[in-house]
Image (spheres, grey):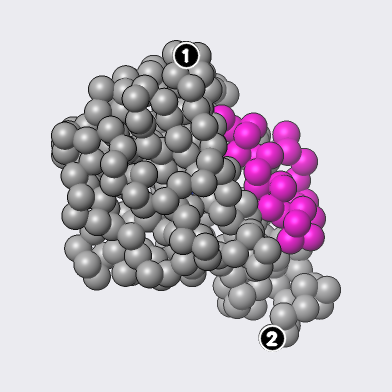
Amino acid sequence: MKVYVNGEFFYKADAKVSVFDHGFLYGDGAFEGIRSYGGLVFKLEEHIERLYETAHTLMINIPLTKKQMIDAILDTLKKNQLKDAYIRVIVSRGEGDLGLDPKKCFGKPSIIIITDKISLYPQSYYENGMEIITVPTVRNLPEALNPQLKSLNYLNNILAKIEASNSGYSEAIMLDSQGFVAECTGDNIFIVKKGELFTPAQGRLRGITREVVIQLAKSNKNPVYECQMTRHEVYNADECFLTGTAAEIIPVVKVDGRLVGDGKPGALTKKMMKQFHSTTRENGVRIP
Ligand code: PXG
């Protein structure tokens, strides 16, 4: 496996950045998780757009154009002869001194592209659904550290993941500071009630998979509402599912000990999973 580091390819064991990189010292940087299916990279431009938006807010000047970044990703996939892959793109502030100030960073931003296989959850979750819980750690306040930023500082999500894992669960609902459902640690959440879909409007990452699901549902003439949602609505939904690049679409059948619907993956969830599967095989940027 070869890893792209600042324009060069290194074997996994030799792919390294400096301990003075502010990405390591402070989590000062941005990342994206992308997938390719059968040689097509799904929603590549959208992921690149989001990466550059995070970098723009962090005032990190990525030393590649978006086109060059796309070519570097395709090149890395080609070098590794991967058709079905999980792609992690990381842009960090680069080398600096032992102070916070990015202005004192003398190095150029580091760019790393890792391509590998990933299966996040066991197949049984997709077939039988997943049980999740709500955890005490509240999602970052948008006015403090906006959840739109896919930054290298993922401690908010990691703390929530630890709480889920300590209780024996793989994924968890995070609430916003007002107690409304925001999202999960690495996935967006949807509920279905009477053929209509609902997903939190605020306090969450504007997930790319979430956007695909919204478009698919609309094309099926299923209304989609982005709204405020409490756990009461989730417990009493007909169906619930999570969306994310890594997880794709995963049914949820129990939340905080309450069965959702009949406790089996719902019909609309299964339909969305099928449609998502097809759309990922038919659309995307081809690996040369
Ligand atoms: N919310 C959060 C907080 C995320 O990190 C999503 C939603 C889904 O967004 P996309 O655009 O992928 O549909 C994410 C992204 C992991 C892992 O290992 C998950 C993500 C990123 C990195 C790692 O579970 N999810």
Which secondary structure, mark 2? loop
User: What's the residue at 75%, 46% (across, down)?
Assistant: 64
- Report x, y in % for residue 88: 51, 48
> Seen in the image, is 220 located left or right of residue 16?
left
Structural crowding at the residue carrying mark 2, measured as other residues with C-alpha within 10 Å and reported as few (<14), some (14–19) or many (≥20): few
- Report x, y in % for residue 85: 41, 37
Quadrant location of the C terminus in the rendered image? top right
Type of the residue with mark 2:
Leu
In the rendered view, tell whether residue 273 sits above or below residue 227. above
- Report x, y in % for residue 20: 64, 78
Judge: label 2 CB < 8 Å from ligand 1: no
Where, by quadrant of the figure, is residue 125 drawn?
top left
User: What's the residue at 46%, 61% (across, down)?
Assistant: 179
Judging depth in this view, the residue of 141 and 160 nearest the camera is 141
Kindly identify which residue carries mark 1. 221
In the rendered view, tell whether residue 162 sits above or below residue 286. below
Based on the picture, tell me whether residue 53 belongs to the magenta stretch: yes
> Seen in the image, is 134 located left or right of residue 55?
left
Structural crowding at the residue carrying mark 1, measured as other residues with C-alpha within 10 Å and reported as few (<14), some (14–19) or many (≥20): few
Determine if residue 280 is in view.
Answer: no
Which of pointers 1 and 2 lies earlier in the amino acid sequence? 2
> Seen in the image, is 76 located left or right of residue 38?
right
- Report x, y in % for residue 239: 29, 34
Residue at mark 1 to residue at mark 2: CA–CA distance: 55 Å
Judging depth in this view, the residue of 26 and 39 nearest the camera is 26
User: What's the residue at 31%, 37% (across, down)?
Assistant: 237
Determine if residue 151 is in view.
Answer: yes
The segment highlighted magenta reads 43-67
Which secondary structure, mark 1? loop
Magenta stretch secondary structure, dominant: helix
Kindly identify which residue carries mark 2. 98
In the rendered view, tell whether residue 14 sits above or below residue 66. below
